[in-house]
Image: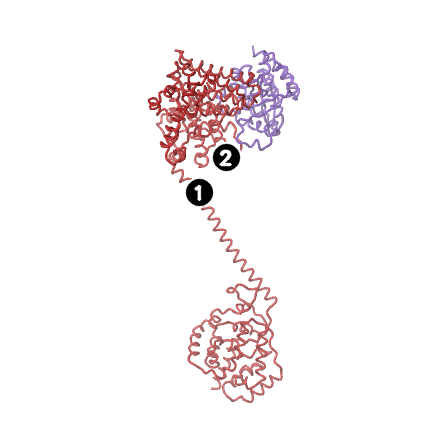
Chain colours: A purple, B red
Amino acid sequence: MSTRRTGSGPTLNFKAVLLGEGCVGKTSLVLRYMEDKFNTQHLSTLQASFVTKKVSLPDERRAQLNIWDTAGQERFHALGPIYYRGSDGALLVYDITDQDSFQKVKSWVRELKQMRGSEISLIIVGNKTDLEEQRAVSYETALRYAQTVGAQYVETSAKENEGVSELFELLTQLMLEHHGNKLQHDASSLRLQSGSSGIGISEDIDTDADNAGAAAEQRSCCGI
Amino acid sequence: MDAHTPGYYYPPKLRIGQQDLKCRQGCGFYGNTQFDGLCSKCFRERNDKQRKKLKACEDEAAQSSGASAAIGTVERKSPQHLLSLGRSKSKKETEEARNAHTMPKKKFTVPAVLQKTLKSKLPAVAQQQPARVPSATENQFVLQLRQLRIPDEAKRKLKSEIQHLDYEICKYINSHSNLNIDELSELVQNAYTRFADIVHNDARFEIATNEDRDSAIDFFEKVVMTQNHNLLFSPYFTTDEECDVQVQKRIRQLSWITAKHLDCSIDEVNAEARDLVYNAISELVGIDSYYSPQEKLLCTVRCCRHIFELLKRATGGPASADDFLPALIFVVLKANPVRLHSNINFVNRFTNASRVMSGEGGYYFTNLCSAITFIETLNAESLSLGAEEFATLMSGEQAYSTPWESALLACESLHLISENMKCMEQLQKRNSTISTGIQDFERELIEFQREVTEKVDAAIAKAPLNLLPIKTPVHLISQARAHLTLEVATGHYQTNLLQSSLSTAGKAKALSTPDDSLLHPSHTLALKDTSINSMGRLSPLQQTAQQDQLFASPIFNYTPFDAVSLLEDSSENGDMPLLSTEFQGGLTNINYDFDLSDQSGENSAADESKLNLDEFDPLAQPNLVEANNLELGTTRGSLIDSEVPVSNVLLPSPLKPEVTNYRGFSNFNIPSISCNTGDSSSLSQDTNEAKAGVDSLK
């Protein structure tokens, strides 16, 4: 985003789109995230399709996270590109008990890669881990796929509030890294900051850190 | 971003109120938009004032230096004039700028319609007028500029930047033969970026806060876009207009689409939901009436908020995009806003790119864009319809067949009817609950009454009113008996006496005539005892009766048997059939044979009772209580009619408020001994016997 104020403004503005078939729990994820950090009254505002959240970064900067929900119905699938425009990150949510929703994620990933290339940080989210016994997509399958497309893979349960805040922290971190990479030519301190912030934020499990490494490689490949 | 400022611009409404048409001065006459919202009179007054001012300022204006040029440049010519006068613009602009300093307010208020007259009358002023079209907007901008909390230096820079971009836009449009809207858009976007850079890095903006910087950037965009709206909005060298027409046609073709087709949770038949849909629609339609992209975006945001409100009510929770997009599509379809593409493109091209990329406005705008894209590309599949059905619906060959809903949508009055019917249904329901409640209550009341009666009865049965008989000294009885035996052959009284004395010893006195009572002091003593006794136990009413009884005793002597009492008797006799034959006979007998003379008095019953002396007898029949009650009645008729002891009326019994239902003692055969006040039944019995005795004698 060329016009975003970055150099002098202390607030970074990130836009992330939320993709996923209907009923995979996109909205629940967002609500859970907002609810846990904010009071419940804030959440009870009008809608859950567009939420913003201010995040304090370790280096005293502040970032504003804009999360854009998208309609997941098949009939609106073609409208996706309108939403991707200018987005820094994408959360691709699927239901681990639903194989179809995972296939849908794949098609979105293709589209995103086509449109945004390496401009965008991707996180594939397997939601509803509380329904482990009905699982239809194995963790390994999803992880392998994520690695092949250079995305992160996270499993969450919006219902049990497992891994939700971690998910959004990871997202912020990834977008911040991207942002740093983008500005690396400025020879500014931003890169250093993003590096340090990455460490600061990262409280994720080891696998995620590994994934990040793998994803970084993937991204560099795609970036060529 | 500034919301529309009051007075500056009135957002379009679907319905125009009376107030909107009135003169802004509030003089009561209708205003005219040509006269700046004033009525003709107020407008002329104001004009006269301004003309005078203009004259006064004229000389000053001529002398004013170019140093102040920068301040005035915010006031700009309106776009349509720019187009025609663009080439000579730069020259005029300096001139303008000079004037703007001294009289920024006067100029915009001089209306175009009067310019010609001004020209002829005031040549010096007219010279400057043609380039300057009065506009409230410009004045507003100047005011807003003043309000911006940035250093004056920065303001000056801001003005010059605005001026510069204006100039560049005009130059581009007027100089290029091969116009390309994308190039123009890029030009504007670059200017935005440059200006943002200046705002954030320039020394002149250093002390400003972030918010102030943002508002400066917004202001920059707003002024430039408003001023150049006519140039940049749907320019002739683009296909925007054709697109507008196409999409409008398309939407018209799709008029048959209902909320159900889109799987959206809008209840078209619900009045509240419909109001919100209408609100959303009017906001959506209103987008076209704003000049700057920011305002258009704000309008979109308002529209979407209405939709979210609607969805929140429909689904009961915060709506997600899955609900929102279909609803937005539905609203767009129903609104069919004018110049949709032009507006979208205008915003897309000329607003600050970050605005559509982030923020709430950006999100909603993006949704609006995708809604339009969906409408343009939708096919049978996306509405889950068969291809054939879709084709026939699109061609209008077949009307979409939900008669009920389409009728409702077509006809407002039907809407109303359906609403009213719903209302009536509710009212009916409430009404029926009320009536059942009333019935229940009634039942409960009756039950309650019954219970209370039962309880009272039980309580009374437990602790009956025991009126003990008066004990007459034995020697008196024996005296009386002796006396009676003496006079045994003196007439029918004696016969009666004989009868009663045969049955009960004490009845001897009952048969004693007034003469007897007078004659025998002992007897009168007994009577007195009675009365005193009763007075002690019974109500005042009773007492009076008793007193009457006392006084009555001498009356027996004097009151003759008269016609009036006879008449009364006969009328009372009419009631007789209601009574048991025993009573009937007894009473008739009383009347005729025994004590008609009593009837002449008002308290015949009391009088009567006086005669009944058997209560003095300790051996009296136990069931005399009932008769006792009867006797207490005020009028004989009622007593006979109801056959219910009325004693409870007269008895000041707090236990028994209800009168009619009360069966009283009559329900129970209370084995109590007769009270002092005498009783008619025993009397009648007695009289019966007496009569029989008389008959037998005869």
Q: Position of residue A38 (x, y in %)?
A: 60, 30
Nearer to the camera, B547 or B260? B547
Q: Quadrant of residue B240?
A: top left
Asked if badges 1 and 2 are on one and the same chain, I answer: yes
| Residue B330 is at least partly visible in this image | no
Of label 1 and label 2, which has the lower sequence position? 2
Per the model, the C-alpha gap separating discs 1 and 2 is 19 Å
| Residue B112 is at least partly visible in this image | yes
**Three-letter residue code for mark 2:** Arg
Q: Measured along the vertical axis of the image, is residue B423 above or below residue B241?
A: below
Q: Which labelled disc corresponds to residue B423?
A: 1
Say few, some or many: other residues with alpha carbon within 10 Å of mark 1 (under 14 / 14 to 19 / 20 or more). Answer: few
Say few, some or many: other residues with alpha carbon within 10 Å of mark 2 (under 14 / 14 to 19 / 20 or more). Answer: some
Badge 2 sits on which subunit?
B
Residue at the disc numbered 2: B313
Nearer to the camera, B458 or B435? B435
Q: Position of residue B149 (x, y in %)?
A: 53, 24
**Three-letter residue code for mark 1:** Cys
Please report the residue visible at 48 percent of the width from the left and 80 percent of the height from the top.
B595
Please report the residue visible at 49 percent of the width from the left and 51 percent of the height from the top.
B436
